Amino acid sequence: MEATAVRNQSRGGELLRIRLACFAVCPFLLVELVKGEEFDGGLIPAGVVEDSFGSAGIVGIENGLQKLGRALFGKKAATTTTPAAAPASPPTPAGKPEAPKTVGKPAKTGNKGSEKVADRHDGRLRDFYPEAAAARLAESRHEVTGKEAVSKIFEEVVALAKRFDAPELDLTRLELLPEVPGNFESDWRALVTGSVWGDRKVIQYSVDRAYTTAVTQSIQVRSFTRLPRIQETIIQENTGLFSTEMFGDGDARHRDQPTGSILTTGETGRFLEDVYEGEYGLRKRLGTGGQMSLSQRLSSLDSNSEFLDPNPQTGSEVVLSIAQPLLRGAGKDYARSEVRLAELDRDFAVGESLGLIEDYLLDVNGAYWGLYLSRAALAQRQRLTEQTSEVVDLLEDRQKLDDTATVSELYRARATANRREADLRRTQMAVSTAEQRLRSLIRDPELPMGSAGEMIPATPPLLGRPSVNIQASAREALLNRSEMAQASSRVRAAAVRLSQAESELKPQLDFIGEVGYAGITNGRSVDRAIDDMNDHGTDLRGGVRFSMPIGNEPAKARLERRQLEYEQSLDDYRIRGEEVLLQTLIAYQDLLTAYQDMSGKYQSALASRKEIEQIQDRIRLAGEEAGNTIAYQLQLQLDAMDRNQVAEEEFLVAIVAYNRTIANLQRAMGVLLRVDRK
């Protein structure tokens, strides 16, 4: 008895060590659990907004609302970015002309160390989606190859931009043109910021405020920001495939069958049996492509067979199993490729959202300067109407001296005054229409569309000469445009799918392993069955599973298709780069043309002003006795005022067009919406 006890104790210790070794695999299961579920789709705002001009080199003056906070896509309360706007003019000492602002200074750009172009594209997107970086998976070999291909194509496209040396793109040509002073004199400029309606609530609006309000309040912008959030749910869905799963099942059977042999129950008659079986446990898809499960199986059996011993009986079995691919579908790159593809699709959605928001802000910019244009035109026509009334009054005074000499001139002057008053009323309605359009875009709660109130543009237009060169603008556009980041994401997604196809071309060879131990007891006691399980040996099982389609044509076709798609994505990246260059080139040419036009229209307006001044001087020198001459000169003054009005309106339109082309160039360069990376 003593020897038997010692032998049983030794055997029990050995079994305990074996079972501890079996369950040492369980921490690996827990580690895979952490790796597979360590994901947070939340979007946390971080950093401050960068002045778009400062980064892009468009305007070398600090924006008045540079620090706004960000989180376009954040779940927390979001303020917004600061798209570049025309800054307010600093005060000028009396008697000194104001130096014009310089529109653009070359920005220092270039790769930082060994950072790849694709990383710069990603950085541009993560500026607005900062939490995406923390949850990203490691890049596969194929994706790294795709990034290197992107960098190579990028440098080839940049080389095209270095050849932008046409004479019409030379900035030195603008130095020959007369500048437009930042504080140029005009009768209408000061009236733009005055109230039109007089009895309404007035709100001063800068370009910055219009952008900020639009991004924070617009339903369209809110809709745009939902695009990456929708894709984020797909990442969560694919990541959830690696979550640990609880499972369980149970079965109860009762058999009552005739027997045709005494070997069934020991005698002829009926075979009666009650079976209860159940299994529960945990299983998990591993990051290496395999699957692991840990389960306990319980069973209870009772029958009228003499051959069942013990009868009734209860069994218990604990099993740890693993199935791991060795060729097809093996490795973490393949196992998590769907998660990585979802991440790249999310990046693509961020780029799409940014592009839509920038287009929307470009509409806001156009509506803002449209309001400025309508108010300035109203101020011009108000002044013109007043001047025309003064001329009519002078003619009426002259008629008292000679009631026949100035009759026709007086009628003509009154007709001109009536026409200008009608134009004035029509322009007032144009101001209201332009304001309602801007209100509908920015959706300010203080000034909803159609409500009483008045928006006054507080940002003066930029008048300075451009100084950023086309090469710097083109490279900045290639680095910052969201379309380039989207094309880069497509290349890497195609590379990931190509790696999937290469893995699926291999034969299936899986390793299958299982470790378990079981026990059985008389009666229906589960506890005694578990105790019996602990007193006996361990079951071990290992094997492989192999399959290979003859010819494997489907996998070969998928591989060829993925290879073609990858090559197509590289071509698309190049095409997108050349399209960005073209758009930047056109926007840059429009900027230079708009500046030249503004400079010429300013000189035309100055000349028309001089003409009116000379006519007024002749009228003052004519004297009281030259009645007919004065009437004739007054009529000439009315005609000169018409010409001056046309020149002033053309100059105003040129100013607005120039400021719109600045925003267009910012959009083409991808810096209309930009933040700092802290």
Image: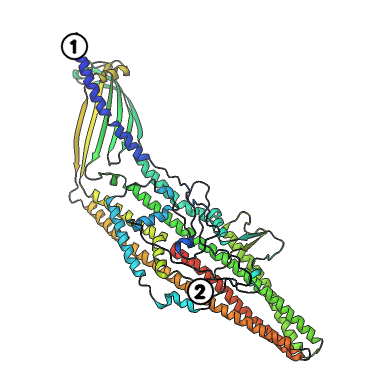
Q: Which of marks 2 and 1 is nearer the N terminus?
A: 1
Which mark's residue is nearer the viewer, 2 or 1?
2
Color style of the picture: rainbow
The answer to the question of whether label 2 and label 1 lie on touching residues, with beta carbons closer than 8 A, is no
The answer to whether residue 571 is visible is no
Residue at the spot 48% in from the left edge and 57% down from the top edge = 50
Q: Please name whichever residue, 225 or 189, is drawn nearer the observer in this view of the structure.
A: 189
Foreground: 125 or 114? 114
Distance Cα–Cα, label 2 vs label 1: 105 Å
Location of residue 288 by image quarter = top left
Question: Which numbered marker is on residue 651?
Answer: none
Q: In the drawing, what numbered circle is on residue 594?
A: 2
594 vs 577, left or right, is: right
Q: For this view, does 647 lie left or right of residue 292? A: right
Instruction: Give the residue number, with chain letter if any, for mark 1.
Output: 4
Q: For the residue labelled by badge 2, is the local secondary structure a helix, a strand or a loop?
A: helix
Please identify the residue farthest to the top as the structure is shown: 1
Q: What residue type is labelled 1?
A: Thr
Q: Residue at horizontal 50%, vertical 78%?
A: 177
Q: Where is residue 628 in the image (x, y as percent from the top left)?
A: 75, 91
From what the image shows, is residue 533 above or below residue 557? above
State the image coordinates of residue 18 (x, y, percent, origin top left). 23, 25
Image position, residue 400 (x, y; %) = 82, 86
Residue 636 image position (x, y, % from top left): 68, 86
Q: What element carries label 1?
A: helix
The quadrant in which the N terminus is found is: top left
Task: Mark 1: give few (<14), some (14-19) or many (20+) Cα within 10 Å.
Answer: few
Specify the quadrant of the image occupied by residue 111.
Answer: bottom left
- Between 404 and 262, the residue placed more toward the observer is 404
User: Does 614 appear above or below 594?
Assistant: below
- What's the amino acid at mark 2? Ala
